[in-house]
Image (cartoon, helix red, strand yellow):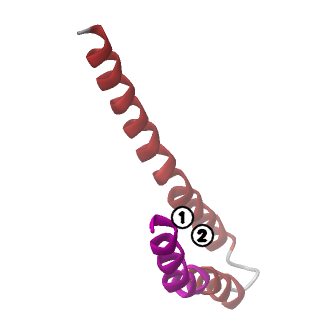
């Protein structure tokens, strides 16, 4: 049952996933070669979007680890 729900969520979200990639590509292609600062900003934005989920997952893992450690000690 859970796998069916996961597959449905994936199928409905795949269009929005590829739409974001094409938007970044279109913006990068429309900017001329003389706009180096623009590309640095675009790369910074991509890195920001990439790092945020990993930070949230790390905070969640630390939270669960500390709660589990606390429950085992009791």
The residue identified by callout 1 is: 45
Q: Say if 7 sits above or below 2 in the image.
A: below
Q: Is residue 9 magenta?
A: yes
User: In the rendered image, which quarter contains the N terminus?
Assistant: bottom left
Measure the alpha-carbon separation of dots 2 and 1.
Answer: 5 Å
Q: Say if 57 sits above or below 37 in the image.
A: above
Q: Could you tell me if the residues under marks 2 and 1 are in contact, i.e. CB atoms within 8 Å?
A: yes
The residue identified by callout 2 is: 42
Residue 16 location in percent, x, y? 52, 84
Magenta part of the chain: 1-19
- Could you tell me which residue is drawn at 67 percent across and 81 percent down? 28
Residue 8 location in percent, x, y? 49, 80
- Could you tell me which residue is drawn at 42 percent across and 35 percent down? 61
Query: Element under label 1?
Result: helix
Figure quadrant of residue 67: top left
Figure quadrant of residue 22: bottom right
């Amino acid at each position: 049952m859970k796998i069916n729900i996961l597959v449905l969520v994936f199928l409905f979200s795949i269009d929005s996933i590829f739409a974001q990639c094409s938007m970044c590509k279109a913006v990068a292609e429309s900017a001329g070669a003389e706009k180096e600062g623009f590309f640095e900003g675009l790369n910074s934005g991509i890195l920001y979007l990439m790092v945020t989920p990993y930070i949230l997952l790390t905070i969640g893992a630390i939270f669960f680890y500390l709660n589990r450690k606390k429950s085992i000690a009791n």
